[in-house]
Structure formats: structure tokens, C-alpha cells
Amino acid sequence: MVVSPDDFERSLAFAEIAIGQIKALRQPAYPRNYEVWYNYATGQNVHLNAAVNEALARSGGLCDKDLNRIYDDLLSPHRFTETIDQLGVKVMNKISQVLAMVQTAAGDASQYSESLADASSAIARAGADSDSLHVIVESLVESTREMEARNRTLQDRLNDSKREISQLKENLEAARTESLTDPLTTLANRKYFDMALARLMADAKASGEPLSLLITDIDHFKKFNDTFGHLTGDQVLRLVALAVKQNVKGQDIAARYGGEEFVVLLPRTTAQHAATVAEHIRRAVMGKELMKRSTGESLGRVTISAGVATMRLGDTATSLIERADSYLYMAKHGGRNRVAVEPDPELPPARVA
């Protein structure tokens, strides 16, 4: 692979900033420390930069504990699984606490019921003795007050637990969403796409409604990446992702499939209508001019090719993807910057738009 001078100089500058920070703060040059500061220098991980800036503002530096926390929270490849597991444990612990409170309340109610039964028996024995009746009534009043106080305390604790569980659920959902999102483009990732495809295929089989899949690929992306550098390549991926986002709606699901490939699942959509969506995406991408951020220099326009297929009876996820991919290859082979569409059964052979 040929590395462009711009990419080489830019990455070296980021490396020097990272090493400079490590030296200035007299930190060990461990790989994870370097990774934190290199990512900080690029500015691409906004959450990491915010966490570093907050720690610097708070104490004027980053200790090992701060660096480890930032790495574990924002860079570690295992962070999503660990976060979800930890939140799940917290939710289960909080539910156990609520169940314990409910059991306590049940015991209090049972005890209060026994107090009422004892009072009823005492009244029956006391007959018309007013002094005895007065004592019994006072005892009932006191028991009722104690029960009301316990109920208020229980209600407050249940309300607190309800708020905590609600917050934990939000945190769990946020962690789950982040684990299913491609960080560079903010589209769904491959894992989410695989899950959605299985669900939508089952729905389509049950309802008899069509389900179409389009696969897009950036034309000559490797050459572009090698010529202008990986950071500019990332900019191209974001540009295409934005065009995809702007042209899908409703129940459609867009995802980064891997590398420079993007996929869109279109439930209740025929191949011909899916081809229209693909064409809108293709034109949107072609209509955007890529600019070099450092100089404002125009780097030209990016194009994509797309293949479209619709689920057939007996299809598996693999067979549907393979057919859409074969039409993507047809578009590439036909000259790129075009859409190839699988024909409906009653229509003529595939066309290339």
C-alpha cells in the first residue's frame, strides 16, 4: 500500500502530540496510554476528548487511574459487553431489593391484621367496660399510625427504586445501542444488521410482504484511500453514510456492512422501489464534492455502485445477501456508478440503471 505524504505527516504529527503529552505528564509510555493520547490528538472521539478535558480541568493532569478508566470506558474492545453485564447485575440487584421490600410490607400487613384480630377478641371480652374499650381503641390507633408510617417509608423507597431502575434501563439501552452502532459513520453495525435481517425475513415470510436488500460499495475506494490517506478515506465513508441516512426512512434499516460497503433493508418494498432508493443514494453521493479540510482543495466527487435483490421463497439470509452482492458485482462490471436490480419474477431479465 502506498501511503500519501499528507497522511504520513498528519499521523506523525498526532504521534508527536501523543508522545509530548506522555512526556509532559511523566506517564509510562504503555500502549494503552499512547492510544488514549493519540485518539485525543486526532479529535475524532468526542467522548474521549471530553473525558480527558474534564480530568485535566479537575486536577491539572491524568493519573494512571484516570487513563485506565478512560481507556476501559471509551477504547477497550470489551467495554460494551462488560458495561451491559454490569448494568444487568445492577438491575437484578435493585429488583431483588424491591422484592425484599414487598416481602417486608407483606409481613407488616400480616402483623397489622393480627393486631386487628386481637383487638376484636379483646373488645368482645371487654363488653361494656368503657375503660377497657378506651385502651383497646388507643392501641388500634397507635398500630394504625405505625402502619401508616411504615407504608410512607415503603412508598418513598419504592419511588427511589423506581427512579434508579428507570435510570439503569436507560443506561443499559444506551450501552446496547452503542454496541450496535458503527462509531465512524453512526449507522448500525454488522451485528445489528444480522439481527435485523433475521427478524425482517421472518416477518416477511409470515406476512407475505416483500423484503428488499440493497448493497452499495464505494467505487475505487482503495485507490482513493491510498492516494489521499486514511483520514480522508474516513471522510468519504462519512459522506456516503450521510447520503444513505438522508434517503432512508420509516422502517428501513441502514448499516455499514464492512469496509466501504453499506446495506439497506427495505421491508414491504419491491425490488423496483428499492432500486429507486438506491438511485437516490447514488445521485446524492455523486452530487457531493469532497474537500480537503486543511487546504480547502477539491478532491473530486465520489461515486458508488449498488445491487438490489428481493427475498424469494426458500431464501436464507446468506442466499439473499449473495444475490444482492451478485447484482452489485454486475453494476461494478457494467462500468460502476450505477444500480443493478434483480428482476421481479414476471419481469424481463435484470437491468442496469
Image (spheres, rainbow, N blue to C red):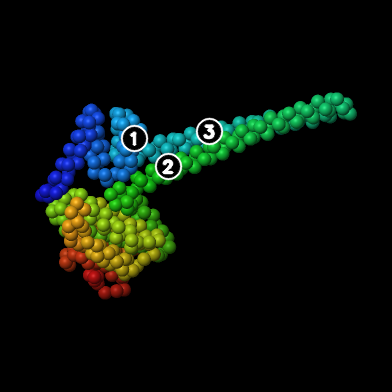
Residue 219, placed above or below residue 23: below
Q: Which mark is residue 171?
A: 2
Query: Residue 153, how many percent across, how many down?
Result: 61, 33
Q: Secondary structure at mark 1?
A: helix
Q: Which mark is residue 97?
A: 3
Q: From the viewer's perspective, is 97 left or right of 294?
A: right
Residue at 18% across / 59% down in the picture?
298
Q: How far is disc 3 from disc 1 in space, using C-alphas?
A: 38 Å
Mark 2 and mark 1 lie on one chain; the one further toward the N terminus is: 1
Query: Residue 216, how many percent across, how many down?
Result: 25, 60
Which image quarter: residue 248?
A: bottom left
Query: Residue 325, how many percent across, how many down?
Result: 24, 60
Which image quarter: residue 221?
A: bottom left
Q: How far is disc 2 from disc 1 in space, using C-alphas?
A: 26 Å
Query: Residue 277, how many percent across, how many down?
Result: 31, 66
Label 1: which residue?
Answer: 57
Residue at 68% across / 34% down in the picture?
148
Q: How many marks?
A: 3
Q: What's under tag 2, amino acid-wise? A: Asn
Instruction: Let me know if residue 339 appears in the view.
Output: yes
Instruction: Let me know if residue 305 appears in the view.
Output: no
